[in-house]
Image (cartoon, helix red, strand yellow):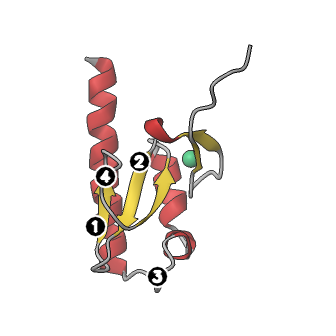
Amino acid sequence: MAQRSKPLRRCIGCAERREKASMIRIVRTPEGELEIDTRGKVPGRGCYVCVQPSCVARGLSGGKLARALRMDELSEESRDNLKKSLNDLIDDKAGEVRR
Ligand SMILES: [Zn+2]
């Protein structure tokens, strides 16, 4: 019996491939803004990270995110903002699981 394969994406933090649906998508919009896309609907170039603070920290360190999104190096400020938003989102998701 053939197994239906689910779409997989590689995490920019740990480089593991996981189900796209279980990951957080980070998008560079056509306007050059960074957005966190929780529904997979935001247009633009995206990359994926696991719902793990360690993956967020690793993914945002160095030039990984900028490379994945084909953009110039991120400013310290946008990196900090993005990290904070991602960690807030992870806290929310963790809360959902516990509820
Ligand atoms: Zn990961």
Of the residues under marks 1 and 3, which one precedes in the sequence? 3
**Percent position (x, y) of residue 65?**
50, 69
Q: Nearer the viewer, mark 4 or mark 3?
A: 4
* Label 3 vs 2, first from the N-terminus: 2
Is 17 rendered above or below residue 79?
A: above
Screen quadrant of the C terminus? top left
Q: Amino acid at mark 3?
A: Met
Please tell me whether residue 43 is drawn above or below residue 75 in the rendered image. above
Image vertical order of residue 78 relative to residue 14, above or below: below
76 vs 24, nearest the viewer:
24
Label 1 packing within 10 angstroms: few (<14), some (14-19), many (20+): few
Looking at the rendered structure, the kind of residue marked 1 is Asn
The residue under label 4 is 41
Q: Quadrant of residue 1?
A: top right
Instruction: Name the residue carrying label 3.
Output: 71
Q: Please name the residue shown 30% across and 39% down the image.
A: 91
Q: Amino acid at mark 4?
A: Lys
Disc 3/disc 2 C-alpha distance (Å): 19 Å
Q: Is mark 2 within 8 Å of ligand 1?
A: no
